[in-house]
Amino acid sequence: MSDIVRGDPDTYPAWFQNKKTTRPLIVSRWVPIFLVGVPVLVLLAIVIYPTIWMFYHSLRDTNIQGLFMGNHSYIGFENYATVLSSDRFQDSLVHLVQYLTFGAVFQVILGTVLALTLYEFVKSNAIRTTVLILMVLPMMLPPSIVGTLWRFLLTPSNGAVNQALLDLGLISAHIEWFNAGVSLWSIIIADTWNWTALPLLIVYSGRVSLPPAVYEAARVDGASQWKVMRRVTLPMLKEVIAIAFILRFTDAFKFVDLVYVMTSGGPAQSSELPTYIAFQRGIREFAIGEAAAYAIVIFAISAILITLFLKYMKRVMKAQGFA
Amino acid sequence: MAVTTANSEAQLQQTSTVADRWRAVRYLFLAFMALWLLFTLFPLYFMVITAFKSAAETNLTVPTFWPNEWFPQNFAGVFAEATNFNALVDSFIIATANTALALFLGSLAGYAFARFPKQAGGENLAFWILSNRMFPPVAILVPMFFLFDNTPWGTDSHLSLIILYLVFNLPLATWLMMVFFRDAPREIEEAAYLDGWTPMKAFVRVTLPLVLPGMISVAMLCWIFAWNEYLFANLFVGTDVRTYTIVIPTFTHGSQTLWNLQMAFSLIAMIPPVTMFILLRRYMVRGLSLGVVKG
């Protein structure tokens, strides 16, 4: 009997538990372990093993020749010291904060405002759906197309954006979109164009699934629409907005493709993010040990954030009667 | 009596000013949304007209917002070089095979998590699997390259990318299938056991059809993520395999960027994900929000 398990009895429907002749889902104890074990093994091989590899080399003076010859030695935390004290890394952290604030955070606010505007203020269903689809289209494009397209649009000398702004009389001279200090903003603009759709879509769907009865009650009570928005809609959407924020924030932390396609971190490293430097040092400049230290620093920061985020998500899903 | 009337009149007045203010707010937000729509559509519009321009017209010092001359032959021009068509085929093979693999493994694990939560390792294991999706892939790029370099098929192959894309698609598929299996009413499945069906038969004949819509949306999401992937492909592709996401940014003729062909190619490559999204957006919201938003 010990090698046999039943499906979770707590979740059996009442009528079923009362039956005397129950024959619930009984399988060998090994079946669930096997079913879950295969993906776990795959992930151990393709995620955990590389992470351990990176940690190992972050403590060694590995470069590309050393790696192939098996010729590298333990140097303690020297790579970390190099990384953490370098101006390049510290600058990239400033860029990251700028990108996360004006990218991820701003996108969630923007997406929420747009979603609620669309739902509350547009009456016709057909228009709503059409506008929603149009606004979400950019999300379906791959980063390489988004990056290429925006590099093309923002070309300083004869790009479409500069020309359109000139024609509208909003600027009097071409904006140099890819100069130092501006190029990171160009990336943020392209990213906002690309990803505001995600919080928008999530908040919109969250609003659609709020129970109409609550609004009926508020209307009977004679609450003003502003009050309904502030006291009913926004509090009820709190979790949904938080989830949208978590998704955007973790994605923004991983973000590197657009930097690579649009500016290659330039000019003069002025639009580099930590992830981009890790990529550049490892793949292009072959400083494996240092790249590994970058990777582990990034990994550690994201591990903390992800743990916090997942804790919150677990709570939300529990409240929904889920996990 | 008089007092009440005065009161209600004041109240009425107050409500009307509140309503006025609300109307003003409404127009303000609608105007903002219209502006945003313009910002969203302008790049797409310019992409479409550029795809129909001649190469000379894309390089004018003053860009045109309507083509002087229409060049639909650009779309044929994209496929004049076999490599471009092959890139789409490569992307298609990789995305489809990866989706099938992720969905197969993910469904089985998701089913185990939904039906045998304790024996399958509990919610902590499920959350750990999900967390793999959130880590920056750039942190594992270098070892991945050497790992696959040592395999018989090497880095520059379909198989390496098919396996590699499991990094983000397998956690997603497992997690979402768990969510969908939990949604499937268990009573019907239990009734099948009462009838003496084996777990396998009940799974295939009863549960699977129930979760099919969810499964399709998971498949679409995984497929789009794999189809659009750039970072891993950028490192792994070589002479044998090139995904279209790698080809598009390097669409040049000598030192000149062929913007018109680049945009035409982008438009063609956009068709599958955009079509899927328009058809299945309601299901996709569930997946995009990791099952939290019912959609």
Image (spheres, rainbow, N blue to C red):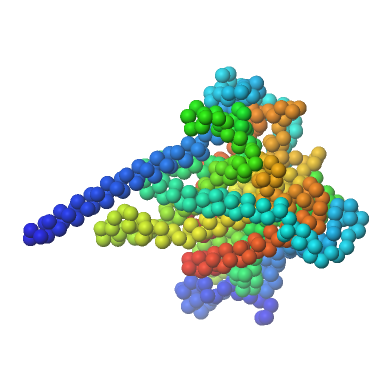
Classify A243 as above or below B42. below
Viewer-proximal residue among B114 and B235: B235
Q: Which quadrant would the C terminus of chain A be assigned to in this image?
A: bottom right
Task: Name the residue: 85% across, 54% down.
Answer: A63
Residue at x 67% of width, y 45% of height: A270
- Residue A187 visible in rendering: no
Do we see residue A77 in this rendering?
Answer: yes
Tally of numbered tags = 0
Above or below, A232 against B245 in this view is: below
Instruction: Name the quadrant of the N terminus of chain A.
Output: bottom right
Image vertical order of residue A147 relative to residue B11, above or below: above
Direction from residue A203 to residue A49 in the image, left or right: right
**Which of the 4 image quarters holds residue B30?**
top left
| Viewer-side residue, A115 vs B295 | A115
Residue A298 percent location from the top left of the image: 69, 59
Q: Position of residue A61 (x, y in %)?
A: 85, 59
Q: Is residue A204 left or right of residue B58?
A: left
Q: Position of residue A175 (x, y in %)?
A: 58, 34
Question: x, y percentage for residue B263?
Answer: 63, 31
In the rendered image, the residue lying farthest to the left is B1
User: Is A229 situated above or below A9?
Assistant: above
Give the residue displayed 63% in from the left and 51% down from the top: A95
User: Image quadrant of residue B7?
Assistant: bottom left
| Horizontal side, residue B239 vs residue B12: left or right | right
At a point 56% along the width and 42% down the height, the residue shown is A189
